[in-house]
Image: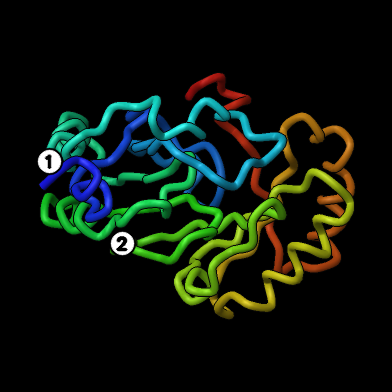
Amino acid sequence: MDKGQKVREGLVLPVMEAFYTVQGEGMHAGHPAYFIRLGGCDVGCVWCDVKESWEAQKWPLMEIEEIVEGALLHPVRMVVITGGEPLMYNLNPLTALLKRKGFTTHIETSGAHPFTGNFDWVCFSPKKFKAPHPSIYEHADELKVVIFHNSDFEFAEKHAMLVRKDCKKLLQPEWSKSSKFMEIIVNYVKNDPNWKISLQTHKFMDIP
């Protein structure tokens, strides 16, 4: 089997980086986690803080067994698969192997590609730059909308109508716009307590 076929089947994946840290945002903020950042993204957020992840060809292809071996070196058994856009790839083999090794599996995704993988927690962060694939809505445990522009509140409500009723809903100020939108977001969630606030606490702590 050539490498292209292995990538299509999810047996090897382009890994930009993998590291042990503390989840900085969303519903699991403050929890130690092992992050696997896959290379490749076709969404193109203008405010993305990991634009170097966009080109998949820049990053080495790793066998999923090697990826999981790296995770096993650390005491935590919570893995977060992120990117880039991780759903560009078939994540069924990687998550199946992680599960067999005792990990709980999380994903952070824009939902722009068909859903794959076996996940305990799905953080869905839709982007205006590329519409989500319809398969994401039934899987989303957490809807996290980044507020960069006033119109993002309406965008958030549009997607909130499509996720499950038990999906947690969060508004997160884009880091460079925090001073502009923080008071607005605070007032928004006070007026509609179905929403919560997510902050990029890892940036305050100056950790990856």
Q: Amino acid at mark 2?
A: Gly
* Picture residue at 56% right of the left edge, 49% below the top: 26
Question: Judging from the image, what secondary structure is the residue with disc 1 in?
Answer: helix
Judge from the rendering whether residue 194 lies leftward or rightward of residue 39; answer left or right.
right
* Picture residue at 51% right of the left edge, 34% below the top: 54
Q: Which residue is mark 2?
A: 117
**Label 2 crowd bin: few (<14), some (14–19), many (20+), radius 10 Å:** some
Q: Earlier in the sequence, mark 1 or mark 2?
A: 1
Image-quadrant location for residue 164: bottom right
Judge from the rendering whether residue 84 lies leftward or rightward of residue 89; answer left or right.
right
Image-quadrant location for residue 126: bottom right
Q: Which residue is mark 1?
A: 65
> Which is more toward the observer, 3 or 93?
3
**Label 1 crowd bin: few (<14), some (14–19), many (20+), radius 10 Å:** some
Image-quadrant location for residue 64: top left
Q: Is residue 19 visible?
A: no
Q: Amino acid at mark 1?
A: Glu
- Whole-number angstrom distance, CA of label 1 to CA of label 2: 16 Å
Spot occupied by residue 141 in the image (x, y as percentages of width and height):
49, 66
Task: Examine the rendered structure and indicate whether residue 48 appears above or below residue 64.
Answer: above
Spot occupied by residue 82 in the image (x, y as percentages of width and height):
43, 43
Question: Judging from the image, what secondary structure is the residue with disc 2 in?
Answer: loop
Judge from the rendering whether residue 195 lies leftward or rightward of residue 103; answer left or right.
right
* Picture residue at 45% right of the left edge, 71% below the top: 139
Contact between marks 1 and 2 (CB within 8 A): the answer is no
Spot occupied by residue 47 in the image (x, y as percentages of width and height):
70, 34
Q: Is residue 102 visible?
A: yes
> Which is more toward the observer, 155 or 99?
155
* Picture residue at 10% right of the left edge, 47% below the top: 1
